[in-house]
Image (cartoon, grey):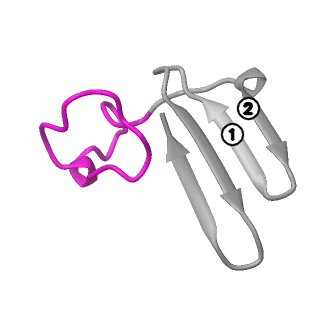
Amino acid sequence: MPILPFAGPVDFSPTADTKDAKYASTFTHAQETATPGRYAVTLDSGVRADLAVSTRPGVGDFT
């Protein structure tokens, strides 16, 4: 299973994608926001990654 969000069928092992030909996604810095304890970016694939942390826990939301 890919660690970062991937929109599409996972039809071969992500670890075999050594050239990032299928499971990588690009983004622009204009599509990211960052504040202390929070980071969010909308990838060019349309998937949004929203990460938040505090002293101990962390959570990721991928939509």
What's the magenta bit mostly, secondary-structure-wise? loop
Residue 61's place in the image compared with 55, above or below, is above
Residue under the image location 48 percent in, 28 percent down: 47
Magenta-drawn segment: 1-24
Residue matched to label 1? 40
**Quarter of the image where one finds residue 42:** top right
Q: Please state which amino acid type lies under the numbered disc 2.
A: Glu
Q: Nearer the viewer, residue 56 or 13?
A: 56
Q: Crowding at label 1, few (<14), some or many (≥20) Cα neighbours within 10 Å?
A: some
Residue under the image location 47 percent in, 30 percent down: 25
Q: Position of residue 39 (x, y in %)?
A: 73, 46
Q: Are marks 1 and 2 in contact (CB under 8 Å)?
A: yes
Q: Nearer the viewer, residue 43 or 56?
A: 56
Q: Crowding at label 2, few (<14), some or many (≥20) Cα neighbours within 10 Å?
A: some
Residue matched to label 2? 32
Does 43 sit left or right of 31 as displayed? Answer: left
Does 13 sit left or right of 23 as displayed? Answer: left
Q: Measure the C-alpha gap from mark 1 to mark 2.
A: 6 Å
- Earlier sequence position, callout 1 versus callout 2: 2
Q: Position of residue 19 (x, y in %)?
A: 34, 40
Name, please, the residue furthest toward the right. 36
Q: Please state which amino acid type lies under the numbered disc 1.
A: Ala
Is residue 17 highlighted in magenta? yes
Residue 23's place in the image compared with 59, above or below, is above
Q: Position of residue 13 (x, y in %)?
A: 18, 49
